[in-house]
Structure formats: structure tokens, C-alpha cells
Amino acid sequence: MIVLREPFTADSPFLVKNLNDVRVIEHLSSRIPTPYSVTDSLHWINVLSSLDAINRIIEVNSQAVGVVGAYLSRDQAEIGYWLTPDVWGKGIASQAVSLFSSWLFRHTTVSEIINPVNAQNIASRRVMEKTGYKPVKTETFINKNNHMDSEVFYLLTKADNGRLY
């Protein structure tokens, strides 16, 4: 069973371990410090999780397996998530994104949620599509390694979410 809960200080070792795993961070935002330290994790738990953001630890059978969260801006949110590699491909990301998206629509003033997904991240693109998000545009940019890259922006509206359940 999947549970989404608030992050706690005790989650710091889990965050540090996984946010230093190249498989996990390969397609994540460049806003995440590299290398990721205990100080970074505590700052995220104690400060960033309360500033225009809602973040949740994803648990399966009382074990932390990832994070899902969103930055809020008026009536729009930007969602993001990651999982530990040992649970990839088990439908957990789709369930977590679906639960969290529905929660955002019910408990905030958000009317639409976006997610910029690296165009090469086929697994995350599938998660977005399985959970009702629609691709709305593609942008090309220079990434943190100074290479050309592309993101596909996915959108879910409150009206679309209501039709899914």
C-alpha cells in the first residue's frame, strides 16, 4: 500500500543516499545540489518543504521509496517526483502521482498541474500519460552539462482530473 506523508528529519539519510545516486538524479532538476549533503536534506525538510511547496515522502509497506512534491504558484503547480531504483517499474510512481495530483486539486486552489519531463525519460513520460497528463509543448535548452536537451511539458487540469476518477 502506498502512503504519502510529510518529510521528517529522520528521512535525511534516505534522501542523501538516493540524491547521490546517478540513476535517481539523471533526469531531476538542476536545482538539486550535487553532491547532495545532510545539510541539503535538512534544509529541504525544514525550510524548502514549507515555502510555496508541498512535498511528500512516498512509502510502500512503511518503507520510504521516493518523493513527490509540487511548487505552487497561484492557480498552477509544478509537480516532480523520484523513486529509488529498486522499486522502478512497479507502478508506484503512477500511483503516487495520481494520489498527489488529486490531493492537490482537493486541498489547494490549484486548477492545473504541469510537469516538465526530460524528453529522453520515457518511463516518466509514460507515468504522466498513465495518470491523465497531456503533452502540451516541447522546449529545447542547454542542460547543466552544457549539452542540448529537450523537455516535454505535461499538463493536468482540475476538470481532467475529475473525469479520471
Image (cartoon, rainbow, N blue to C red):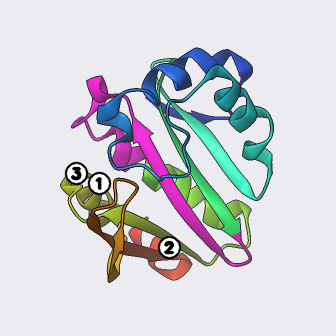
| Circle number at residue 123 | 3
Q: Are marks 1 and 3 in contact (CB under 8 Å)?
A: yes
Closest to the observer: 26 or 52?
26
Task: Measuring from the top left, give residue 62's x and y in whole percent.
Answer: 52, 17
* Distance Cα–Cα, label 2 vs label 1: 22 Å
Q: Nearer the viewer, mark 2 or mark 3?
A: 3
- Tell me which amino acid carries mark 2: Gly
Q: Which residues are magenta?
A: 73-96
Q: Nearer the viewer, mark 2 or mark 1?
A: 1
Q: Are marks 2 and 3 in contact (CB under 8 Å)?
A: no
> Which residue is identified by label 1?
124
Q: Is 81 left, or right, of 23 in this rendering?
A: right
| Circle number at residue 162 | 2
Q: Residue drawn at (24%, 55%), measured in percent from left and top?
A: 121
Closest to the observer: 113 or 82?
82
- Position of the N terminus, as image quadrant, is top left
